[in-house]
Image (cartoon, rainbow, N blue to C red):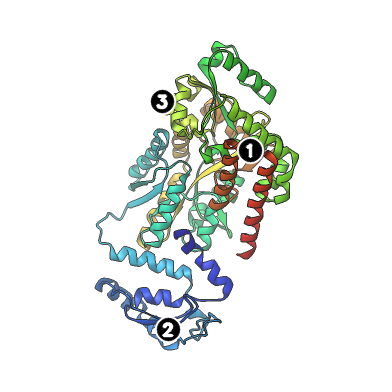
Amino acid sequence: MDATLLRIYSLIKRRGCTITVFFLKLIHCESIEVHCVTQTTQKTSLMKCKSLILMVFSKILRPFIQTSLQKAKPCRAEACQCKLGRSADKVTFRHFLNASVFLGMLSVPFVTHAQTLDVMHWWTSASERSAANALAQAFNSHGLQWQDAAVEGGGGGAAVKVLKSRVLSGSPPAAAQIIGTMLTDWADMGLVLPLTRVAAQEAWKQQIFPEVLHLVTHKHQPIAVPLGIHRINSVLYQRTIFDKLEMPPPRDWAALEGVARRLRNAGITPIAWSDENWQVATVFEAVLLSYAGPELYERLVRARHPEAWLDRRVESALNRLRWLRDLNGPMQRQESNWIDNVKAFHAGRFGILMNGDWVRGELLALTGSSDSSSYCAPMPGTEGMHLYSIDTLSMLKGSMSKQSEQEKAAALLTSVTLQRSYNRVKGSVPVLKDIDPKLLDSCAHESWSTFANPRAHRVPSLAHRMAASEATKEAAAGVLQRFVLNRGVSAQQTQQQLAAVMRTLLKENSRK
């Protein structure tokens, strides 16, 4: 329901409707005629508002309410157009959301300090908590109070649902982890605070990688603070095991096949695997980049050409994905938590760990040094390529009294000191162009240097919302999960299903 409500605005806009009465429902507390809600005219009895809300709104919006009620006329059901006499008086879903935010703040009594910022995110593992704590400590040392609102759930799906619910109920956090394509959706609905002044003051154009700045910019305005860059096509190899067997990290698939054979012969389970859909999708997109190459990958993921998914190289990537799942031999469906897999990898139960470089942060939390417990190398066949996911925080609208604190926080988050401390424990690398890579560990050094190299190929993640909506990401992940779990589903059938997902996406975008 919350996702549906967030899309009502674009639906109404396409049909030429306004929803003035939604706004009037909230602020004019009596029975009124409701027009263009269900394309019929009906009587709706409304709950009385609290006296405080009525008092505030009567002072601010009484003239507008009276004018609107006088001018509003019933419309034909089939026309679905409520006219107020002049276009300036029309109220869209954006106003409805803003009114909801204001009403929610007034209707819930609370006591807070002016400097407190409520921050919603899904950083809940040991390393992620350390990264969030680094941000909180920096806030506290600069006169800001970080009020934590973490939501558990790998991949952030649960947090996104909670965030939508809070916005629709009128209690948005001051800042929230909103990433990838979601940024522009929320910006289009007027829910995020533009950070133009902060970007100018902190020289973001000169300091931040252009690819990163492009991601957080919409309609020439920065709409989020970039925190760090994760490399998805990063593979870890258990150092103790590889040293004992005198094996270097493999750089191509033939070498990886040889490594897997030696691990099995030594009685070691080759790969830490999970059938969770987001983890399957994470491994697949790195394998896809290897087989497709950056040009085809761009057509598949960024340009979203449905027919490109029928390419033979996609079939090869799917077969390799199934090969990886079969490395450990026949097994039942196993949706291991990624943190449990990291711990098992550290304990020497697995030789290979494929799950993005955030697992390095978790190893750091366990051992104090990710380099001491693992070797790091790009996915075979992806040397000189960077498949990225970027952590971002958006400042949400809702209280003008907090805007100065939100801007202060945004400026702080891109400081060199905080970028180093946050990304070191998170497993990611700074978004800044001017840092000394010698200060990074070996894996971070390779990740940052690859991203900074103008000749390198930087491509966005599908599995982590950089190049797809939440719905598209979930649909694609579901298709891939069914493929690895069901031997009766062929690679060609899966290609057709992935192409269908992209066609649906294109149709949805064309209707917006």
**Foreground residue among 479 and 404:** 479
400, above or below 301, in the image: below
Q: Residue at x 57, y 11 (%)?
A: 245
Q: Residue at x 53, y 62 (%)?
A: 188
Q: Which residue is mark 3?
A: 366
Q: Nearest to the eye among marks 2 and 1: give it.
A: 1
- Which quadrant would residue 251 be assigned to in this image? top right
Q: Along the polypeptide, which appears first: circle 2 or circle 1? A: 2
| Amino acid beneath label 3 | Leu
Q: Is residue 481 left or right of residue 107?
A: right
Distance (Cα) linking label 2 and label 1: 61 Å
Q: Position of residue 415 (x, y in %)?
A: 46, 42
Q: Along the polypeptide, which appears first: circle 2 or circle 3? A: 2
Label 2, secondary structure: give it: helix
Distance (Cα) linking label 3 and label 1: 40 Å
* Labelled pair 3, 1 in contact (Cβ < 8 Å): no
| Amino acid beneath label 2 | Ser
Q: Badge 3 local density, few (<14 within 10 Å), some, or many (20+)? A: some
